[in-house]
Image: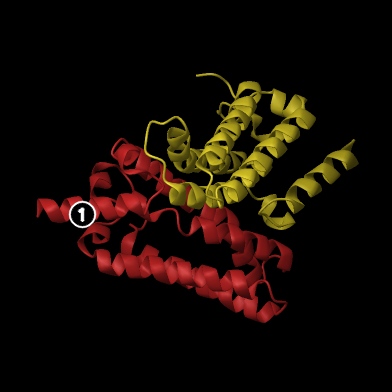
Chain colours: A red, B yellow
């Protein structure tokens, strides 16, 4: 069991922004702050496309394409901050993140994949297709939040 | 004067993640939170390369290249959050940001350019060149912080 934990920590560290040595120095509250920072920025760059898809603000293809690129990078950043050690830090993360890691990973992958599709669709000129893909990203956000984030 | 302010607001909005309509709805404290989130993430992804360049952790070319890509996106994100309206919100931002916008813009550009160079150098295999460029990025961070961020 100890070996399994060690290996899973190793896999996390290798997949993260941290090298093994520095990873072990990152405090749980810093990990939470970092992953929350990603969520803050995802909304910064998704809110405009989202409102465009809803028809609440005028469509701007250039802004969508630029923001999609930012979201592509951001969509890869939060996940290594969700390690069991952070459960003692106040946040809206639900226990299901740790009790059902397979489902959580599937939700991450679905989100990343929808964002990647937005990157490629937003390079074309089809406004309806772009708006449909914005809605697909929104669904992926919502699905992960519904299962893994506490309601306010 | 009113026209000038309006135009400068327009330029900011167009350059930002926000469309005009939604931009005006973003509260100063949200702008501060967003720009601070970028700084948090820049350190998340710069800290490992920085420690590698210092010889404190083992060099890992793959991590540097991956993080450089993330930093490239992040380095473009904080600046539209530095608008005069945010001066009433507690942060370490110094008044020079608003009294000397030309110098602040030059510092942003220098930082982005050093990060872009790191992206391209880290694609090659020259460890010494990569480490030198990591130090150049560090210098650009430091130079901006020295002039525009309050010491703790």
**x, y (%) of residue B40?**
48, 39
**x, y (%) of residue B96?**
71, 23
- Of B90 and B58, nearer the camera is B58
Residue extending farthest left: A1
Tell me if B109 is positioned left or right of B27 in this view.
right
Q: Which residue is mark 1?
A: A7
Question: Would residue A58 be seen by someone viewing this image from the given angle?
Answer: no
Question: Would residue A141 be seen by someone viewing this image from the given angle?
Answer: yes
- Of B109 and A103, nearer the camera is B109
| Picture residue at 52% right of the left edge, 49% below the top | B125
**x, y (%) of residue B22?**
67, 55
- Of B137 and B131, nearer the camera is B131
Tell me if B72 is positioned left or right of A57 in this view.
left
- Of A45 and A66, nearer the camera is A66
Number of residues whose C-alpha sits closer than 10 Å to that of mark 1, classed few (under 14), some (14–19) or many (20 or more): few
| Picture residue at 46% right of the left edge, 48% below the top | B61
| Picture residue at 54% right of the left edge, 61% below the top | A72
Residue extending farthest top: B151
Q: Return the chain for callout 1.
A: A
Quadrant the C terminus of chain A occupies: bottom left
Q: Is residue B24 above or below residue A124?
A: above
Q: Is residue A124 above or below residue B55?
A: below
**x, y (%) of residue B106?**
75, 33
Q: Secondary structure at mark 1?
A: helix
């Amino acid at each position: 069991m100890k070996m399994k934990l060690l290996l899973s920590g190793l896999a996390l560290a290798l997949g993260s922004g941290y090298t093994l040595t520095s990873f072990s120095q990152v405090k749980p509250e810093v990990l939470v702050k970092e992953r929350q920072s990603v969520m803050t920025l995802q909304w910064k760059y998704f809110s405009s496309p989202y409102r465009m898809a809803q028809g609440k603000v005028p469509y701007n293809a250039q802004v969508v394409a630029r923001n999609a690129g930012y979201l592509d990078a951001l969509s890869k950043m939060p996940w290594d901050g969700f390690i069991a050690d952070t459960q003692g830090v106040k946040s809206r993360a639900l226990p299901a993140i740790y009790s059902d890691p397979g489902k959580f990973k599937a939700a991450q992958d679905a989100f990343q994949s929808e964002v990647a599709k937005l990157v490629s669709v937003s390079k074309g000129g089809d406004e309806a297709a772009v708006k449909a893909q914005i809605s697909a990203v929104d669904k992926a956000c919502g699905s992960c939040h519904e299962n893994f984030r506490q309601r306010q």
